Image: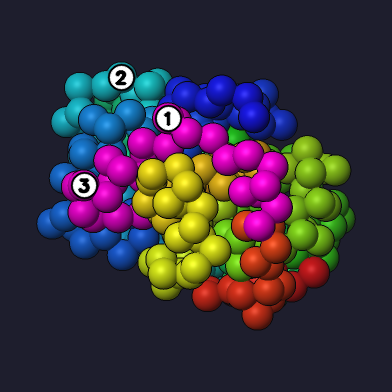
Amino acid sequence: MAKRTITDTLRLASAHPIPQLGFGVYKSPPDLCVQSCLTALRAGYRHIDTAQYYANEAEVGEAVRRSGLGRGDVFLTTKILSPAASVDQNYHKCVESVRELDAGKDGSGGYVDLFLIHSPNCGGAQGRKMLWQALERLHQEGKAKSIGVSNFGIQHIEELKEFAKVWPPHVNQIELHPWSQQTEIVEYCGKQGIAIEAYCPLVRNTKAADPTLVKVAEKHGVTPNQVLVRYCLERNWIPLPKSDNEGRIQKNADVYGFALDKEDMDVLNGLNQGAAGSIVQAVDN
């Protein structure tokens, strides 16, 4: 396997680079989120993934400002879940998220690196259309360098063709780990040049005692979670491990001192349970 480092990036179809290791903040409460993000940035993460639904965009923005890093040194992603009544109203909801994350030099709002539609279950085809057109406007104005989707199946991505000026989406963020590999949508996205982000890569710690996973971890002298993060990297996915524990945040980033060989990858790939292995949701293709 090729040597990997925490500074590795992938190039999106928008031509912008995305750090391959991301840090998730789902359910990270406001009083912990700033500190968790600062810990992650100190550990070397340069990519933070939030959402309107998580209610901690302001805290992520505060952490970046307090980190001492330049805005261009940190890749910020957010998402919109619930559509408003019009494209214009959705656009303004998104602009508010941009302001929360990056106030910009004059306080009017800077940019986010990636803005996603959080779910296809957002008011049917019309809701998806309004949200995508709002994101396209953000992208055109430079308020979102890249735009994409989350939890979208093949049918939802194909549907965008009917009206999209930006197609394919630059990213599809879906649940991915050895027990839910979602091969159909992963293969489709690969053919279309859509980058794949992996949420719940640690399976919310529900598989930490899995004998196969533990055996691979013991072989390399690392934790099961470190194996899961490294697994995603080897699959060319963009994992978004989440934790509010300082030690685990650091451990989950310390995945570059070992490599998974073909035997390791084969046994981990063999754990796939299809849709039944998902703990949040498998996409609807």
Q: Which of 26 and 168 is in front in this view?
A: 26
Q: Residue at x 67, y 47 (%)?
A: 263
Q: Label 3's element?
A: helix
Q: Mark 1 points at which residue?
A: 257
Q: Nearer the viewer, residue 100 or 274?
A: 274
Mark 2: which amino acid? Gly
Asked whether, in this view, residue 252 is left or right of residue 189, the answer is left
Q: Quadrant of the C terminus?
A: bottom right
Q: Label 2's element?
A: loop
Q: In which quarter of the image is residue 27?
A: bottom left
Q: Quadrant of the N terminus?
A: top right
Disc sitting over residue 70 in the figure: 2
Query: Is disc 3 in contact with disc 2, using a CB cutoff of under 8 Å?
Result: no
Q: Residue at x 27, y 50 (%)?
A: 248
Query: What colour scheme has been applied to the protein in the rendered image?
Result: rainbow
Instruction: Of the two numbered discs 2 and 1 on the same chain, state the one appearing first in sequence.
Output: 2
Q: Mark 3 points at which residue?
A: 247
Magenta residue span: 242-267
- Residue 232 is situated, as x and y percent measured from the top left of the image, at 57, 47
- Residue 275 is situated, as x and y percent measured from the top left of the image, at 68, 75
- Can residue 203 be seen here? yes
Q: Label 1's element?
A: loop
